[in-house]
Image (spheres, grey):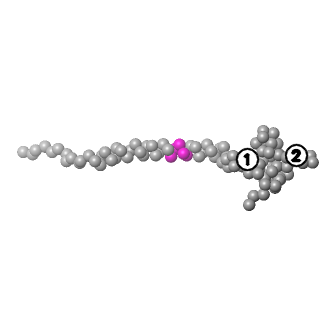
Amino acid sequence: MTRPDVEFSFDEAVRTMGVTPERLERLIAEGKLAAVQEAGRTRIPRESILEYFSGVSAVLPRDRKKQAAAAAKSEAAAKAEAAVEPVAEAAEATPATEPATEPTA
């Protein structure tokens, strides 16, 4: 059960989200993360943090490049395999012929 009334202090949100204070300030300023000012303190609703995380990838950019390269390699291998299969099937369908022999005298 989620509790929509749970709010994080600025420092709690920094620790929970694993971002720097500067990054958290930027997310709030860009409107990517909702924040509430209470008695001069910044509070971040739990739902706002959950919404933010639902829209971001947990994969680091350098790892995304590796994943994309691996996917491209797999796709190329699958295409190459698909191109070889019809040739192999055609070879199997062609009747084997005996080599021509010269009549011996």
Q: Going by the image, does 84 lie left or right of 65? A: left
Residue at 67% x, 47% y: name it.
57
Q: Residues within 10 Å of mark 2 (few under 14, many from 20)?
A: few
Snapshot quadrant of residue 23: top right
Q: Nearer the viewer, mark 1 or mark 2?
A: 2
- For numbered disc 2, what is the local secondary structure? strand
Snapshot quadrant of residue 100: top left
Q: Going by the image, does 43 lie left or right of 104? A: right
Location of the N terminus by quadrant is: bottom right
The amino acid at mark 2 is Gln
Rounded to the nearest whole Å, what is the CA distance between mark 1 and mark 2? Answer: 19 Å
Q: Which residues are magenta?
A: 70-74
Q: Position of residue 70 (x, y in %)?
A: 55, 46
Q: Residues within 10 Å of mark 1 (few under 14, many from 20)?
A: some
The amino acid at mark 1 is Tyr
Disc number at residue 52? 1
Q: Residue furthest right?
A: 39
Q: Residue furthest bottom?
A: 1
**Which residue is disc 2 drawn over?**
37
Q: Position of residue 26 (x, y in %)?
A: 80, 40
